Image (cartoon, rainbow, N blue to C red):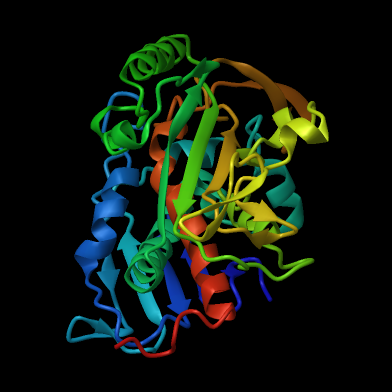
Amino acid sequence: MGGSIIGERFVALSFGESHGRCVGIAVDGCPAGLPLNESDIQGLLDLRKPGHSVVTTQRKEEDKVEILSGVFNGFTTGAPICMLIWNRDSDSRSYDLIKNIPRPGHSDYPALVKYGGFADYRGSGRFSGRLTATLVMAGAVAGKLLKSTLDIETVAYTSEIGGIKANNITKDNIATRYTNDVRCPDPEAAQKMKDAILAARKDGDSLGGVIECVSTGLPVGLGEPIFGSLESDLSKALFSIPAVKAVEFGSGFAGSKRRGSENNDLYYLKDGKVMTRTNNSGGILGGLSNGMPLVIRVGFKPAASIAKTQETLDLSKNSQAHLQVPGRHDPCVVPRAPPVVECAVSMVLADHAMRAGLIPAVLK
């Protein structure tokens, strides 16, 4: 199976390049009978698309989704669902000038070697963050499927940018995460994050950060240990997002510094339901969901394209070179990442729910 395909029952095949004609995704395995139209997908795409604020790239893309197949009279048919968005505002001129000068922090050099110079290098081609739009399209379908059949809901938000951490995050203010430019529920931290991003941009630099993602309503037992464990497949999907360099579940690295007596989640009964008093496991034990909320944190590196002059190589001359990366770029990719993380997680959860036989082939 190629690297552009993910899933076993809810299967998605991503296609397109950053500066090609379009980017899109084909979803196979979605049950028949799910109410679906382009507006179900467009809302999440609008949250991800570029040019929405001063802290993101100023590339202007409408990102209007088109459903080409798999939906008839407002319902999924059970056939593959092909969706795409057209690239309208790409400018490739600057990339022709640096095609032999690998940008620090980018995939230019290993991609050049792997594909023998035939890969589309414009705007990072297949390796561009633009391809996260394909995850959003498929994940929007998966999210609606999970909500309508199992009442599973996934929300993601910015919890840290440039070392500035959100402290005041509650169930109530998570709903406000998209009301500010950085998608952080803590308004005080959100303003500090925005100021830090603008300061980095002014310096010709960039920042990284952390997205936290919480899924609720999961049944007990999702996952296929050992290589198809829920953590394994979620990690695979999340690391497929460009710029992701870290994924942790529950207490994660903090838990590695504790004793077992501090980190173990103790069981109790609440209204006849098995619960744990803490959730250091992040909702997964032994690769299986345990019924508690799924809690994931995703670390994004600073955006690689920066205006500062950096040392690199001119491969056409086999000599040292200096490069100031041209073009329009995000000073921080984190503000556009919450819908991408939500959708990547939803794709995996839908796939595992179908593998567990919890979602029928035809919805009624």
Q: Residue at x 32, y 83 (%)?
A: 69
Left-right relation of 317 to 206:
right
Q: Is residue 197 visible?
A: yes
> Where residue 309 sits in the image (x, y, percent)?
58, 15
> Where residue 210 sits in the image (x, y, percent)?
54, 31
Identify which residue, 279 or 331, lies in the foreground: 279
Left-right relation of 303 to 107:
left
Which corner quadrant holds the N terminus? bottom right
Identify which residue, 194 or 128, lies in the foreground: 194
Which corner quadrant holds the C terminus? bottom left
> Can you say whether 116 is above or below 76 in the image?
above
Left-right relation of 341 to 328:
right
Q: Residue at x 30, y 52 (%)?
A: 44
> Where residue 246 sits in the image (x, y, percent)?
66, 38
Q: Residue at x 24, y 83 (%)?
A: 75
Q: Residue at x 52, y 78 (%)?
A: 354
Q: Which residue is outermost to the right?
A: 259
Q: Which residue is outermost to the left?
A: 73
> Where residue 88 sits in the image (x, y, percent)?
28, 52
